[in-house]
Image (spheres, rainbow, N blue to C red):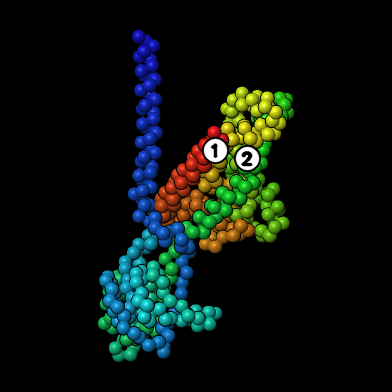
């Protein structure tokens, strides 16, 4: 009877612990959804984080044509519509929502020094900062953001008061994560290209070829120890040891390549350990059967053992990708904390997780944008998880 109650108690404790863990995870996801789901749009993924400002004027000899009507806060006189939006930086601004193809705002030239009066046009989604226009008396009138008030008032001013547009200052929306998304992809691809073949090969040697000895035992213990080393130490190692290597290929300072090399070193213990565990699970009978049929040891390993261990190896790959996406401490030293909208392998940049760190460490933390990026990271991990499982099933079916 006593044993029965003990079993019931242990089972209930398991259920309670599982429920608490699931509930906490649910609360975290719900918080991220409530805070950041509203910001997840195509614009967030495809636009730059830093806004680009332009100052332009209407081409003087442009002849206006009839412009079609449009719903919303639309100026039929000038063929442009506006809307009130909140940026990812939590600013209330007036954005361009529509521009008629015949609108004068599609026929502008830049007045910024150094651009040689090149032709420009306002894109939909641009933010209107200020404007100079001519009123009915021919006077030059300045219109600031404060004077615009909102989208409806701006459209009304253009229709009722403006007889000419002298200049307009506008900027792109900004707040996008395109650059950080590119850096994250660079880190994943480069680090796996380096660490995966080395890690799998090392695991094969240690488990299939290496004899049991004190040296090999120390190597295995060292690999297990490296798995638990804080990543910030790897970051310091990357700056001091790996930076001279990246300098040889043209990197002048910390770079995406340096971060990828550092992540490759971080991932090696994980890949070696997961691959070794996968090889251990493969029944010895498969090896013996292959050898008895005349196959060499190498043929047995690469044609029998590895296909049987593919699930465990791909699990290691999935863990590695998750580590790369979620890493920040090591990348602070190796890729920098500069949010770069046009990163290259040899330039500085931030990954998605490091971008969250940069946003939250500023004077005014942006919880909404950080939550939106966190949701995107979760979705990327889920997508990669699905792809890895699909590939794993394909391998297993082809082997069977």
Which residue is at the front of the view, 328 or 361?
328
Image quadrant for the N terminus? Answer: top left
Image quadrant for the C terminus? Answer: top right
Residue 206 appears in which quarter of the rendering? Answer: top right
The answer to whether one can see residue 337 in this image is no
Give left or right: position of 67 versus 357. Answer: left
Question: Nearer the N terminus, badge 2 or badge 1?
Answer: 2
Q: Is residue 188 depicted above or below 88 in this figure?
A: above
Residue 71 pos. (x, y %) = 27, 71
Q: Distance of mark 2 from mark 1, alpha carbons? A: 28 Å
User: SS for tag 1?
Assistant: helix
Identify the residue under disc 1: 398
Residue 104 appears in which quarter of the rendering? Answer: bottom left
Q: Residues within 10 Å of mark 2 (few under 14, many from 20)?
A: many
Tell me if label 2 and label 1 are in contact, CB under 8 Å.
no
Report the number of numbered marks: 2
- Residue at coordinates 27% horizontally, 76% vertically from top-left? 69
Identify the residue under disc 2: 268
Q: Is residue 326 depicted above or below 163 in this figure?
A: above
- Residue at coordinates 59% horizontally, 25% vertically from top-left? 283
User: SS for tag 2?
Assistant: helix
């Amino acid at each position: 009877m006593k044993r029965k109650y003990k079993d019931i108690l242990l089972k209930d404790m398991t259920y309670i612990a599982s429920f608490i863990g699931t509930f906490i995870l649910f609360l975290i996801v719900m918080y991220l959804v409530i805070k950041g789901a509203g910001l997840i749009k195509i614009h967030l993924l495809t636009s730059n984080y830093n806004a680009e400002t332009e100052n332009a004027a209407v081409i003087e000899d442009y002849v206006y044509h009839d412009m079609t009507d449009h719903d919303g806060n639309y100026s039929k006189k000038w063929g442009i519509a506006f809307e009130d939006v909140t940026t990812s930086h939590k600013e209330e601004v007036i954005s361009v929502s529509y521009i008629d193809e015949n609108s004068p705002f599609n026929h502008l030239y830049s007045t910024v020094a150094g651009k040689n009066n090149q032709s420009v046009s306002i894109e939909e989604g641009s933010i209107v900062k200020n404007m100079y226009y001519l009123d009915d008396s021919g006077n030059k009138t300045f219109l600031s953001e404060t004077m615009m008030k909102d989208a409806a008032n701006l459209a009304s001013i253009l229709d009722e008061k403006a007889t000419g547009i002298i200049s307009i200052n506008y900027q792109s929306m900004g707040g996008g994560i395109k650059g950080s998304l590119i850096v994250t992809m660079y880190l994943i691809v480069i680090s796996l290209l380096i660490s995966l073949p080395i890690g799998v090969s090392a695991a094969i040697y240690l488990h299939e070829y290496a004899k049991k000895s004190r040296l090999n035992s120390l190597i295995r213990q060292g690999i297990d120890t490296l798995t638990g080393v804080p990543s910030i130490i790897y970051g310091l190692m990357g700056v001091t040891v790996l930076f001279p290597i990246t300098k040889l290929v043209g990197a002048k300072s910390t770079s995406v390549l340096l971060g990828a090399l550092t992540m490759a070193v971080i991932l090696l213990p994980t890949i070696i350990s997961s691959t070794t565990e996968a090889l251990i699970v493969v029944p010895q009978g498969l090896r013996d059967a292959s050898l008895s049929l005349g196959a060499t040891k190498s043929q047995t390993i690469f044609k029998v053992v590895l296909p049987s261990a593919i699930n465990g190896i791909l699990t290691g790959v999935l863990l590695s990708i998750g580590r790369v996406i979620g890493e920040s401490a090591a990348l602070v030293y190796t890729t920098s904390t500069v949010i770069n909208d046009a990163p290259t392998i040899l330039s500085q940049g931030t990954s998605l997780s490091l971008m969250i760190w940069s946003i939250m460490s500023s004077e005014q933390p942006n919880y909404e944008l950080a939550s939106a990026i966190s949701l995107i990271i979760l979705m990327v991990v889920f997508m990669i998880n699905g792809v890895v499982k699909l590939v794993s099933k394909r391998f297993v079916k082809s082997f069977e």
